[in-house]
Amino acid sequence: MNNELLSYSLEFNRLRLNLLVDMDSSVSETLDYRPSSGQGFVFVIGEIWLLLPEDSVLIVDRLNAGNLLVTLNELERQLFKPLINADDLVPVGGWAPAVQDYWRKIDEECATEEDEHRYDRLAKCLLVEGLGGRIGVYEHKGVPIVEVSTPSKHQALRIARNVWSEFDPVAIRTRLRQLCDELQRAVATRIRLLKG
């Protein structure tokens, strides 16, 4: 196999995530894990990248993403819920630095009970966390905000990046549904072609 990679994007108003899908591994994993009655089952192997004007940053690597299709479905499901109101919790763009500060305090063993309560609220905003970073959503003054940051608590030595954007939850849910459908079709088509 030639390890074909397909790229899909998820665009918010001011930031873009790129999903890099390994088609050959996805076909292989789908065939390996498909239940006997699971004709519609698809296992997608891929990564989530933050695309910046000056750089691309890995947020979730393929080894820790699990089934990317499940991750995307979970993102869509989370966006159907009311977003956490962060007006009294953090300023816009302040979610990721607050999470990072909490983990710093944990590492330095100086977190207080107040820090723990605050983190409980911050954690409810988390959508995805990988070895490279995290993605969270919340509402600030009635405006939905997505925030993507690196590094995660797992790679604290990397250069910190934090970007945020307003977004339309309906448009993003629609795009997530389209992505899931496209990925399922692409892998299923490849399997049909292999079986000839």
Image (tube, rainbow, N blue to C red):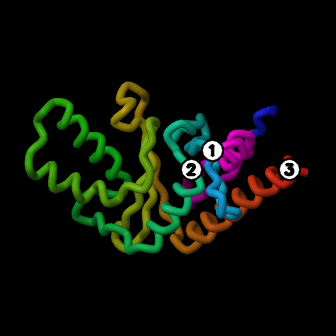
Q: Position of residue 1 (x, y in %)?
A: 81, 33
Looking at the rendering, the stretch of residues picked out in magenta corresponds to 5-32
Camera-nearest residue between 130 and 1 = 1
* Residue neighbourhood size for the residue with mark 1, other residues' Cα within 10 Å, grouped as few (<14), some (14–19), many (≥20): many
Amino acid bearing label 3: Lys
Q: Which mark is residue 45?
A: 1
Whether residues under marks 3 and 1 lie with C-beta atoms below 8 angstroms apart, the answer is no
Q: What distance separates the C-alpha of mark 3 from that of mark 1?
A: 20 Å
Residue on which disc 3 sits: 195
Residue depicted at x 13% and y 41%: 111
Q: Is residue 176 left or right of residue 5?
A: left
Magenta-span inclusion, residue 134? no
Mark 1 falls on what kind of element?
loop
Can you tell which quarter of the image residue 62 is in?
Answer: top right
Amino acid bearing label 1: Ile
Q: What distance separates the C-alpha of mark 2 from that of mark 3?
A: 23 Å
Disc with the residue nearer the chain's start (2 vs 3): 2
Q: Is residue 192 left or right of residue 18?
A: right
Magenta-span inclusion, residue 20? yes
> Closer to us: mark 3 or mark 1?
3
Amino acid bearing label 2: Asn
Q: Position of residue 54 (x, y in %)?
A: 60, 35
Position above or below: 87 against 114:
below
Q: Position of residue 115 (x, y in %)?
A: 15, 49
Residue on which disc 2 sits: 67
Mark 2 falls on what kind of element?
loop
Position above or below: 188 against 82:
above
Camera-nearest residue between 184 and 13 = 184
